[in-house]
Amino acid sequence: MSKNAILCVDDEAIILDSLREQLQNYFGGSFLYETAENAEEGLEIIEELASDGVKILIIVSDWLMPGIKGDEFLIKVHQKFPGIVKVLLTGQATQDAIRRAESEAGLFAVIHKPWNSEELFNVIKTGLEKNE
Amino acid sequence: MKIPLINNTPVVLKKKLFFAIFISFFAFQGCNFSKGAGNESNISVLIVLLVFFLTVLMVYVVINYIRNKRNAAAVSSFIDYLAGKVQPAFTGEETQYLPENDITKGLRKIEIRMKELEARLQSRISEIENQHVKLQEKQKETERQNLELKSAYEALLESRKRYEQLIDNLKDEYIFFSQSPSGEMLFASPSVKTILGYSVNEFRNIKNDIFTENELNIAAREHIQGSLKGIKQPKYLVELSDKEGTPHVLEITEFPVFNENDEFIAVEGIARDITKGIRAEDIIKEKEEKYKLLFNKASDFVFFYSVGNNSLPGRFIEVNDYTVSRLGYTKDELLGMTLNDLADVEIWEDEPPTDDFTGNKKYEQIWTTKDGEMINVEIVSHNFKLKSREIGIAIARDITDRKRVEEEIRYFNEELVNQKENLEALVDNLTQTQEQLVHSEKMAALGQLIAGVAHEINTPLGAIKASIGNLQDSLKKALEGLPVFLEKQTTASLQLFNKILEYSSGQGEGLTTREKRKIRKETEIRLEAEGIQSAATIADLMIYLDICQNIDELLPLLKNNGSEEVMQSARNFISILKNSNTISLASDKAAKTVFALKKYAHRDLIEEKIPTDIIDGLETVLTLYHNQLKQGIEVIRKFDDLPVINAYPDDLNQVWTNLIHNSIHAMNQKGVLIITVRNENDYITISIADNGCGIEPDIRDKIFDPFFTTKKQGEGSGLGLDIVKRIVEKHNGMITFTSELGQGTEFTIKLPVN
């Protein structure tokens, strides 16, 4: 059975834990929920899931992270998986970065921390709908 | 001379008569002699007398011979004797005894001889008569001379008397004295007592100790030395103290005295007491001269005037040379003018004269010279009564230059005041600008931090918000599921539930997502191997509940039916714990950031040192930079225990900020930042070292210069290190650095503990 996954990337564990639980609570068991503490790990997971036949539908990434920044990460992902819906969930991102992600990573939406759960769910739902 | 012939008188009688005449004549001459004026004239008188006597004697003999030829021989021998030819035995007795024959012969001879003698006598007589006449003339001359001598003598007496009187009269003013070349006082007139109070003897024994301190005596001593060497000195003044100590000024006239061999033997002199005279005439004369000079040579307008209206100067009475030459009018022209003819305005119209307490009036005017030149004068006038007439004297000073200079000074002064105000305003502005710059540098650094800071705050806020939602969800589910859970409870499920609650702390194990993923995968495989259904879901739950490490113990329970539901229920409870923990962590994180931010942005208004914890400050800055640092920089802290020091904590925070910021920049976000704090008793040393790119050698001496920056325009103000240096110096500290290209840079700050 092919499963769909949502990947969250953030350098803060508290974000990953709460976000994951939040998504799980809302979307329940329809998805796999994967979390990565940085972009490199995120790329690993993508590759891993792909080889496992799990399709990542959506990536929710922070922007300001050690190492590869969110925009760059999403661009990299986009080059391999242009179909994945990319959302930036960030406490702060430069306009340049957002513009780059929009043009080069097909950024779907930017959600600012602290986020509103309804907004997040709507964005993801809309993204998923768009993807279908 | 006529001698009365006494023919009939006996010889003896005649002899007696002659003697009487002789004596009486002598007596007369003797009397004359005794009154005689001199020895020489006495001798001449004696000679005259002797000649006279001889003449008389001869006449007498001749006459007797003529009358008595018996005595002819005797007479002849006598005459021979007189002529010096024979030595006769000359007595009357002898001639009477000559023989008769011989007498005739003799008589003849005698006759011849007589004739000869007569002739000779005649010539002799005429000779004598001549002499007699001469003698008479001589006598007259002598008498006349005697008379002259007498009157001269009387005149001398008279004059001596007068001089004595004069000297007597002058004794209050003059001292006559003489001194030996060795300076010994040989003689001093008694007037020394009157003038100086010393007796002659006292005076002769005093020497220099009566000289006063008067400057006169310096020259006087030189004159005295000169005099004692026999050099004639001009009149000089000396001041001596009298016996009572009162000074007397003496005018000394001295002259050297030499003996016939031209040897200098004494100094004689006259000292005149001119003490009073000096005060009177000389001083007055000198003063008058001086005032005259002062009046005419003064380079101010000096003039006397008649007093006009309002007791102010009217017509000129007397003007000095300067007034004449400066104003260009002749003296006569000026004397016909009043002060107001010179001035364009009446003096009191312009500015009323001010009276000072001396009675002087002081005011300023503008005068016009004959050439039309305008001059500013400052007049000081003083009115006084002179022989019941009120006149005044004024001194006016040409203050044109002064006025001009004053005007210029006033102008420049105003300029200066303006400039000063401008400068002050500028300085104020600059100070303000500087303060603003310092603050804005701080804010700029803050601005650069804001990105991280926003993230640092928004991240926990996001976590909190999500966690609260999760909490509500879990609580709702837990409460909803609770009755069913309690109803369906079996021993096995209860056991599992208890175990889960026992093992799951809800704190999280601090595992990375990668580790968790690995563990989850292993757990899922194990569960599948054990034949447990929904292995993936249970593995997820186990990860969530942090109970994967207890899998061996839990496996039998997990194999029971409904274990998944038990786990879901437990998850709902544990979720409350987990999310509460997340909220707690997130709030701490946010609070820490906000606190650091507040500390950092704080702007001290009271510029006073306060007890400061250096490490606390460093940590604050590190907190603010946490977000940037954690992305690739390892921070190594080597902190000694430190005493609290008095400092400006906000300023120091800016130092740490600027240095750490520079290090991050130099390391391009990746590297090792070593912060060392050492307690060196009197000093605290803080060093911030990075392994970044280092500072180019050619700019190392410029890095502390204001506005010097290596960053791109707009990225750095160039004030960072300037401010750092200022702040360190404000703490009486020192900042140094070492740097190596490609190896890194270390800044070291030494702060005194006291």
Image: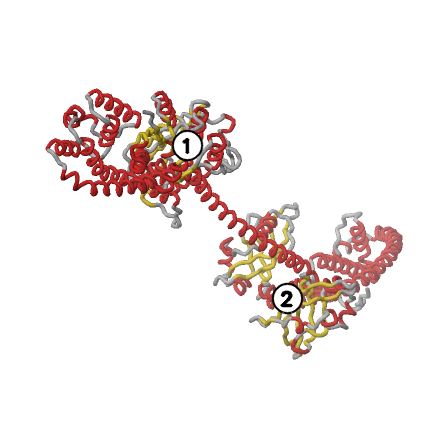
User: Could you tell me residue B420's position as x and y percent?
Assistant: 56, 52
The answer to whether residue B716 is left or right of residue B685 is right
Please give the name of the residue rendered at 35% of the width and 31% of the height, measured from the top-left corner: A6
User: Could you tell me residue B184's position as x and y percent?
Assistant: 53, 51
Residue closest to the eye, B442 or B186? B442
CA distance separating discs 2 and 1: 136 Å
Q: Is residue B649 visible?
A: no
Q: Is residue B399 above or below residue B343?
A: above
Q: Is residue B451 above or below residue B55?
A: above
Tell me where residue B681 sits by quadrant.
top left
Q: Amino acid at mark 2?
A: Ile
User: Could you tell me residue B220's position as x and y percent?
Assistant: 58, 53
Tell me where residue B117 sits by quadrant.
bottom right
Residue closest to the eye, B746 or B478? B478
Q: Quarter holding the N terminus of chain B?
A: bottom right
Q: Amino acid at mark 1?
A: Glu
Q: Secondary structure at mark 2?
A: helix
Tell me where residue B329 sits by quadrant.
bottom right
Q: Residues within 10 Å of mark 2 (few under 14, many from 20)?
A: few
Q: Is residue A83 above or below residue B722?
A: above
The answer to whether residue B459 is left or right of residue B290 is left
Chain for disc number 2: B
Chain for disc number 1: A
**Label 2–label 1 contact, CB within 8 A:** no
Please give the name of the residue rendered at 22% of the width and 32% of the height, measured from the top-left corner: B545
Q: Which mark is residue B284?
A: 2
Instruction: Say which residue label 1 marks.
Output: A132
Residue closest to the eye, B474 or B637? B474
User: Could you tell me residue B577's position as x and y percent?
Assistant: 22, 38
Q: Residues within 10 Å of mark 1 (few under 14, many from 20)?
A: few
Q: Quarter holding the C terminus of chain B?
A: top left
Q: Residue furthest bottom?
A: B388
